[in-house]
Amino acid sequence: MSIMINLDIMMAKRRVSAGDLAARIGITPVNLSVLKNNKAKAIRFSTLEALCRELDCQPGDILEFAPGAGK
């Protein structure tokens, strides 16, 4: 897939653990792990909004278009 999720980078910059972030945005740690490890096929806008709110960032800080990635 050509869309990369840089959630791990933003979490490291903000020094937020996966368990803490999952609890703060209301998703399971397993679902957050799926996002963090680029295994997700989709993301809800409400989840993206919650991530941006809690990490104090923009969607473009989390999502990246990388042509040829994942081929």
Image (cartoon, rainbow, N blue to C red):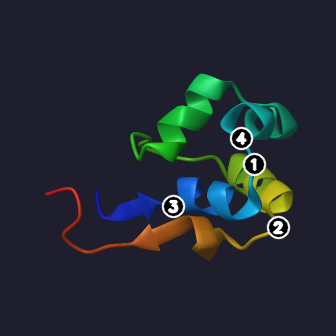
Neighbor class of circle 2 (other Cα within 10 Å; few <14, some 14-19, many 20+) is: few
Q: Which residue is mark 3?
A: 6
Q: Earlier in the sequence, mark 4 or mark 3?
A: 3
Disc 1 and disc 3: Cα gap in Å?
14 Å
Q: Earlier in the sequence, mark 2 or mark 4?
A: 4
Q: Which quarter of the image is occupied by the C terminus?
A: bottom left
The amino acid pointed to by label 4 is Ser
Q: Which residue is mark 1?
A: 16
The amino acid pointed to by label 3 is Asn
Number of numbered markers: 4
Q: Nearer the viewer, residue 20 or 71?
A: 20
The amino acid pointed to by label 1 is Val
Neighbor class of circle 4 (other Cα within 10 Å; few <14, some 14-19, many 20+) is: few
Asked if the residues shown at circle 1 and circle 3 are in contact, with their CB atoms under 8 angstroms apart, the answer is no
Asked if the residues shown at circle 1 and circle 4 are in contact, with their CB atoms under 8 angstroms apart, the answer is yes
Quarter of the rendering containing residue 18: top right
Label 1 or label 3, whichever lies nearer to me, is 1
Q: Which residue is mark 4?
A: 17
Residue 49 x %, y %? 77, 57
The amino acid pointed to by label 2 is Asp
Q: Earlier in the sequence, mark 1 or mark 3?
A: 3
Query: Given the current orientation, which residue lies at the most extreme left position?
Result: 71
Secondary structure beneath dot 4 equals loop
Neighbor class of circle 1 (other Cα within 10 Å; few <14, some 14-19, many 20+) is: some
The structure residue drawn at horizontal position 75% and vertical position 71%, both measured from the top left corner, is: 57
Residue 45 x %, y %? 69, 54
The structure residue drawn at horizontal position 86% and vertical position 38%, both measured from the top left corner, is: 24
Residue 8 x %, y %? 55, 53
